[in-house]
Image (cartoon, rainbow, N blue to C red):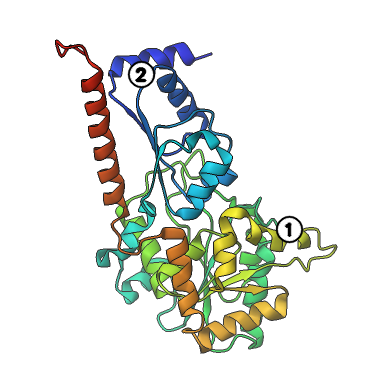
Amino acid sequence: TNAPEVEKKLTALRADAIFSLTPFLQDEELAMRICSRAGLPSVAAILSFDNLTTRSWIPFTFDSYLLWNRHNVAQLHRGYPETLDRDVQVVGSPQFDFYWDPKCIREEREWRRSTGLPPDRPVILFGGGYYTCAPHEPRFLQQIDAAIESGEIPGRPVILFRRHPVDPLGRWEPVLRQAKHIVHDDPWRLGSKVLGHTNVQQEDIAKLASTLYHSQVHVNVASTMMVDGSIFDRPQVGPAYDDSPGGKYHGAALDCYRQEHFLPIYESGGLSIARNRGELAQAVRSAFLNPEEKRVERARIVSEICTYNDGRCTGRVAAAIESFLGKTAESEASAAPASGCR
């Protein structure tokens, strides 16, 4: 019902082309539909490596696509056969570029102080996911805490629990109230009205990069954070079971690692899958004892998902857009009347 108003605003911009990161989101989809109908040249840099298979249908075809990796190219062509004759480029993962910037890594003492960690205990990073992925996930956090208390995981490490920016805290609170070895740290200001609706600052990015760098072991459930952690060559542990009464999510617990976008990670060999509580404690313990194990496989995760490991993917996107606009201008010029009028 608001399409005419949006169309009026977009027309007033007199745009030469359109650039989209998230054409599957409702507001952006509407704008892209209107611009597509108007015939504006269009380019999309799909925001993340899972967006082509886990997000809703993209109802129009762009002239150019900028993607993370070869797997995304295959997914695009299979899901949208009309893109076979479009310009498709692999530019890598711009959202990870800052991990290669030394200025984003804080000194360890400062990082520990800012997150409330003790000064001398080794750190297990537990990256909480969104509740729909693994509703029973807090159980894993509790079990690691208990394994530290019992000595199954030696060395008295501390767990740094970093929850997903839009995941409600309520489901974690029962575990956090009883925990003996957990420090809770929100990733950034979570938004006063809607979780995740916030302006992420440079200091938040530095905190994330420093957390990945200084934590010795990373634990999460089928999360993009496994790519982040592999960039820093830290052991990655993925719980894949449900041992709660009834085991309601046991079947889905392993299947979430077999989602199409996650298969290159699962098949890389760089991830230690834990299929029960004992394997979870053992995987964390082994990660401390032999952190170099699976190093080659973790590098494979980075190459398969990010394609490039040089921190220059944003520049590749910028160059691709510049080239696209140049070709568009040349095409319009060749199609213009002899007078040169547009």
Q: Is residue 227 above or below residue 315?
A: below
Q: Residues within 10 Å of mark 2 (few under 14, many from 20)?
A: some
Asked if residue 133 is positioned above or below residue 342 in the image, the reply reads below
Tag 1's secondary structure? helix
Q: Secondary structure at mark 2?
A: helix
Look at the image and tell me in which quarter the C terminus lies: top left
- For this rendering, which residue is in front, 236 or 270? 270
Where residue 10 is drawn, which disc sits there?
2
Q: CA distance from mark 2 to mark 1?
A: 44 Å
Residue at 52%, 89% in the rendered image:
289
Residue found at the far left of this picture = 339
Q: Is residue 256 left or right of residue 164?
A: right
Position of 323 with respect to 193 (left or right) is left
> Mark 1 highlights which residue?
252
Label 1 amino acid? Ala
Where does the image place residue 303, in percent across and percent down from the top left? 43, 65
